[in-house]
Amino acid sequence: MERTLLELFILTIIIHTVDTLAYSVRLNSVKSGQVALSFSLFNMFVLLSRTANLFQGPLIGSIIGLSITRGLYPVNDMRIVIFASTVGTILGIILIPTFLRIFEAAIRRLELTGSVPSLVVEALQANNIKRIVRSATRPSKTMLEKLRFREIPKRLLILNTLVTGIYTVGVLAANYSALLVPEQARLAAASSSGMINGMASILLTLFIDPKSAIITDQALRGKRPYGDVKALVVLLIGTKLMGTLLGQVLFLPATEVIASFYR
């Protein structure tokens, strides 16, 4: 079970690192004006994250299955996985300056090659890997100077924290609730993870993405300064980090709520 937990820990870090880097794509799209091309390339990174996410469920199910067999309650294991989401978010924050430099260069190359597979093959060449390593940049305090944080709606930030918290514990809480219900209801309880993450996705789509898109679009049209998009990205990432920490608080109450529907 220790090996499964380690694999799950690494996968969760990858998922949340990529999700964190997704926020920074807005900065590149506004700065370069190449919105469609930016998001087209980033779909490749999202695909990697989603592929990792496909393996997360079975790994969690494996831990829960072994725990049922042995009569264990792996609360600490689940909290370690939640902690991995925090680690992944922090890693994403550290990598954002480097990611933006690489992403900007990749956008220029994609415009010339016109093919994502060709771009990937080119990036994997030894010389280009060395260039990518040399382009590593550390975050600096100057990135946060003179940003108009007051221009970003507080409700948007609260919702992003809550949605991230729900998304962080959704699969974990649903699977763990299988330990708290009768045997005939365990499969139904574990399967409810899709419904929980679906609700989080609906909240994201209805209340967070539209407002974020409006601010980004206004900056593209010159109605807002670029700094507002920068402030938006910084605050969304900050609230995402808070959301992963909130997940530690939400985990056990969420499992009890889910289990109560199947008892």
Image (cartoon, rainbow, N blue to C red):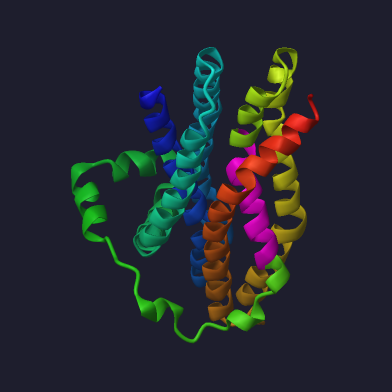
Please, is residue 256 above or below residue 23 in the view?
A: above
Segment tinted magenta in the rendering: 157-171
Residue 17: image x %, image y %?
44, 49
Classified by dominant secondary structure, the portion drawn in magenta counts as helix
Look at 30% across and 45% down and name the residue there: 123
Name the residue: 28% across, 41% down.
Answer: 124
Q: Is residue 52 above or below residue 231?
A: above
The quadrant where residue 199 appears? top right
Seen at 34% across and 74% down, the residue is 140
The answer to whether residue 59 is seen in the rendering is yes
Nearer to me, 46 or 199: 199
Q: Is residue 63 left or right of residue 185?
A: left
Q: Position of residue 3 (x, y in %)?
A: 36, 25
Q: Residue 237: where, in percent of width, then height?
A: 53, 62
Judge whether residue 197 can be spotted in this image.
no
Count of marks, rendered view: 0
**Residue 165 falls inside the magenta stretch:** yes
- For this view, does 132 lie left or right of residue 64? left
Horizontal side of 209 relative to 131 (left or right) equals right
Query: Which residue corresponds to the image point at 42% horizontal and 57% vertical from the top-left?
Result: 90
35 or 85: nearer the eye?
Answer: 85
Q: Quadrant of the N terminus?
A: top left
In the rendered image, which quarter contains the C terminus? top right
Does 83 lie within the magenta span? Answer: no
Q: Is residue 82 above or below residue 108?
A: above
Most extreme residue toward the front, as rendered? 71
